[in-house]
Amino acid sequence: MNSLGGIRSWPANWRSTTASMTTTESVRKVPQVLTVAGSDSGAGAGIQADLKVCAARGVYCASVITAVTAQNTRGVQSVHLLPPEFISEQLKSVLSDFEFDVVKTGMLPSTEIVEVLLQNLSDFPVRALVVDPVMVSTSGHVLAGSSILSIFRERLLPIADIITPNVKEASALLDGFRIETVAEMRSAAKSLHEMGPRFVLVKGGDLPDSSDSVDVYFDGKEFHELRSPRIATRNTHGTGCTLASCIAAELAKGSSMLSAVKVAKRFVDNALDYSKDIVIGSGMQGPFDHFFGLKKDPQSSRCSIFNPDDLFLYAVTDSRMNKKWNRSIVDALKAAIEGGATIIQLREKEAETREFLEEAKACIDICRSHGVSLLINDRIDIALACDADGVHVGQSDMPVDLVRSLLGPDKIIGVSCKTPEQAHQAWKDGADYIGSGGVFPTNTKANNRTIGLDGLKEVCEASKLPVVAIGGIGISNAGSVMQIDAPNLKGVAVVSALFDQDCVLTQAKKLHKTLKESKRGI
Ligand SMILES: Nc1ncnc2c1ncn2[C@@H]1O[C@H](COP(=O)(O)OP(=O)(O)OP(=O)(O)O)[C@@H](O)[C@H]1O
Ligand SMILES: Cc1ncc(CO)c(N)n1
Ligand SMILES: [Mg+2]
């Protein structure tokens, strides 16, 4: 929450906070979300949606029920509020026991219920708070009346990390401000931000006359419009709850706010697309399938999103090495990808801008045809010009928050970090991943201070952002890097181990095998 002053470094021992329960070293802490919301008997929205999305995203979700609704695909037939004292009992039970990374709220239908929530949050401080200010179901039924508006505005919104109103809810919070266009959604986001939440996402699922489904994100400085083509389906019941809980789940895993929001938007989009033709119930608003990811061919997903596992074998190019071995960059990349490289960074320290751009375009074609993302080192202008998948910047390059505002919400941004402080800042600025090193001495980068395996571990522990290790890594030591026992260390980045070699394909295959074996060994 805001009291934590910016989403915050996770405690250095966050992986072992349950260690008192057992003396073994193999304790594995699972990211945990608490949802405080209403039950939907039709199970498309509310608590039931929250549990499903968290399960689908690999996050544990506990549930405190505020109200029980009699609800189906035709609408809400009746609502029964639970006594505030009993809601407080539920809150105490779980907050005194679990270590939640994030609390997410949905239906909070009375002032008394908000009061008991606030009291419990002050007794048991949590790391982050996602507030979905549920007021009206898409079918038009009032789930929380105007009596809650003042306590929301005055006490709940100011402590929220993010609020996710739909257009009707945003309008209600702003005394009936009309929201019918994206420009009005922006104004609403700005006014809501002034009420105190750190981030605002105004959802446009119900925006009239819009062929795209547009959500407006505001961080206090920059706006981002998150757009996707509107899916023609009746099965949109519970999209709002799903979106907010997916944001909570991604935050619990360690994403920055913008990354969490992007993943959540794409999750809803993919789920709606997968479920557009299913028929459950006879009404106008059907539920959708949250577990599409278990069933479909991952290649066919509507939109690709940054997957931290892509950092597994991260190949960084070097034109001097290609010259030395007399091969083109395109041939070198093809071989690296065919051998198992999972993401590419184009690092070009010598070429003129025009030459670099032509090279980047050729490399993008190869990467796209293999479904592998291509990042550009340092040069935001080149990344923009060739529509690369993202960039990697160092501490003395352009600051990450500025890069984000130039590249927009969808691009991947990585940043090099040597210290826990830099890792913390990377999270705050909205980076998608951290590159940490040099782990070992290397000739590829002159005068680069090495941080060793201990330094790498410190960086990993300072943030839950995914980390890729870099610097002097090859087949002989990749295993020792992967075994430092940090769950967010996702892979290794290499230059010479692939490109300063006689056969790039063979080396990539060997390195991939070594990494796989060391992963199995953890
Ligand atoms: N038909 C659609 N196609 C694509 N995305 C959609 C569609 N409908 C809603 N969304 C997306 O789903 C998310 C939830 O948006 P929406 O504005 O519907 O929230 P809500 O009204 O709170 O949801 P609920 O239906 O649960 O009440 C947003 O990211 C929105 O852009
Ligand atoms: C219980 C519940 N919470 C939230 C929503 C909003 O979709 C709903 N329809 N039902
Ligand atoms: Mg809606």
Image (cartoon, rainbow, N blue to C red):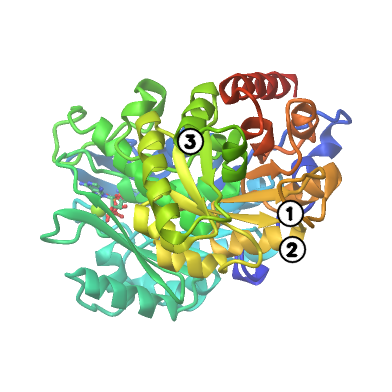
Amino acid, disc 2: Glu
> Could you tell me residue 43's position as x and y percent?
34, 36
Left or right: 161, with 143 as reference point = right
How busy is the neighbourhood of tag 2: few (under 14 within 10 Å), some, or many (20 plus)?
A: few
Local secondary structure at mark 2: helix
Give the CA separation, mark 2 to mark 3.
39 Å
Q: Which of marks 1 and 2 is nearer the N terminus?
A: 2
Name the residue rendered at 49%, 23% in the picture: 338
Tag 1 secondary structure: helix
449 is higher (above) or lower (below) than 372: below
Q: Which mark is residue 421?
A: 2
Give the residue pinned by disc 3. Answer: 328
Picture mark count: 3
Instruction: Please give the name of the residue rendered at 47% of the width and 30% of the height, measured from the top-left corner.
Output: 331
Give the mark toward the camera: 3 or 1.
Answer: 3
Q: Where does label 1 land, which residue?
A: 462
- Looking at the image, the residue that sits furthest to the left is 209
Give the Cα distance between marks 1 and 2: 8 Å
238 left or right of 432 in image: left
- The x, y position of residue 284, in whole percent, is 13, 41
The quarter of the picture where residue 18 lies is top right
Q: What is the three-letter code of the residue carrying label 1?
A: Ala
- Residue 482: which quarter of the image? top right
- Disc 3 marks a residue whose amino acid type is Ser
**Mark before the other along the chain sequence, 2 or 3:** 3
The residues tagged by marks 3 and 1 sit, at their Cα atoms, a distance apart of: 39 Å
Nearest to the observer: residue 369 or residue 413: 369
